[in-house]
Amino acid sequence: MFEIYNIIPSVYHLIPRGSITGAEITSIFLAYVLPGILIGGGFALWYVYVFLKSYKPKNADEFEKEKYNKDMDMRPGRIENLERGNKTIFKIFVLFVVLILLSLLVYDLPPAYGIRVAGAAPSAPTDSHHYMDINVVGYQWQWVFIYPNGASSRHFLVLPADTPIQFNVTSVDVMHSFYLINVTKVDAFPGHYNYVWSNITLTGEYQFECVELCGLGHAHMRGQAFVLPKAQYESWLKTTRGGEMVEQFHVGTYSENYGPNNYDNGTVITPPSAGA
């Protein structure tokens, strides 16, 4: 994707980016949001300036005269003069909006049609042997992660660094949205899988959460993702065991999910210890 925001490193380059796709998402987000803020804010300031410059307090005589003219314009049978406003300003505004839309279209077309752009993130691997599948299942109000060996976890996620990962995301009840901060985001629909891939380049702890309002416990649909070096991840994965599939997970009530023993139903594995 185009690195069009190198001229504003104070904004773009200080945003944490833990993955290749995370950088691309940030670039697209800024491409749309920053012009909107600058242009929208500019128009707002311009309107305030014009209003303050043109505003003049009216005395009683001027007020009565203006009221009389308005009353005369509303006489029965009178056709109001519709020639108002400034056509030149209107044409400039329309042209400006068209140019913005065309610019965004040109910005998005190359990746949309698979055209390689200098500095763009690589395409998702097509060979299943070169990426890892992680199944992500959302329900009120938890996330379940199922690993390639069948093991599963809730409230936390463990991933290897420098490995292409495909997240297969779905829901078992209402619409959710899985957001792995600084990495990727994808909606979760009941009865449907959405697929998104990423390659996390930095080890460490990340946060994930649901960003689609989904009910009473929405704020609890969050947790930590541990990104480990490949060797450490493989070692940790060997300590886990295959678990039940998501259809067999107990989807309980709010009190059951957050009661005293709420972390023990289903097959759940423990996160890696720090420095393991």
Image (tube, helix red, strand yellow):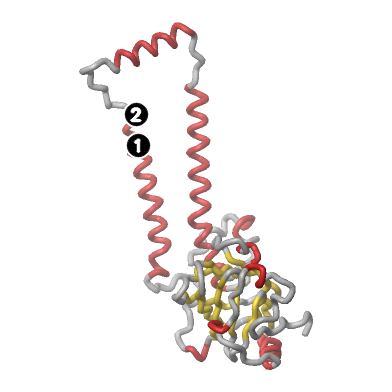
Give the side of residue 218 with respect to residue 231, left or right.
left
Q: Which residue is mark 1?
A: 90
Residue located at (69% from left, 85% from top) = 269
Q: Is residue 160 visible?
A: no
Mark drawn on residue 190:
none
Against 97, is 85 above or below?
above
Using the image as rendered, state which of residue 118 and residue 162 is in the foreground.
162
Using the image as rendered, state which of residue 116 and residue 226 is in the foreground.
226
Q: Which quarter of the rendering shows the C terminus? A: bottom right
Instruction: Using a 10 Å C-alpha cutoff, classify the residue at mark 2 as few (fewer than 14 neighbours), some (14 to 19) or many (20 or more).
Output: few
Residue 246 in which image quadrant:
bottom right
Residue located at (61% from left, 89% from top) = 243
In the image, what residue type sits under mark 2? Answer: Gly
In the image, what residue type sits under mark 1? Answer: Phe
Query: Which residue in the rendered view is the most extreme toward the left?
Result: 77
Residue located at (40% from left, 55% from top) = 103
Against 157, is 103 above or below?
above
Q: Which residue is mark 2?
A: 85
**Residue 124 point in image, percent of width and height:** 48, 79
Instruction: Using a 10 Å C-alpha cutoff, classify the residue at mark 1 as few (fewer than 14 neighbours), some (14 to 19) or many (20 or more).
Output: few
- Mark 2 vs 1: CB contact within 8 A: yes
Element on which disc 1 rests: helix
State how far apart marks 2 and 1 are (Cα).
Answer: 8 Å
Residue located at (48% from left, 32% from top) = 47
**Residue 122 point in image, percent of width and height:** 49, 77
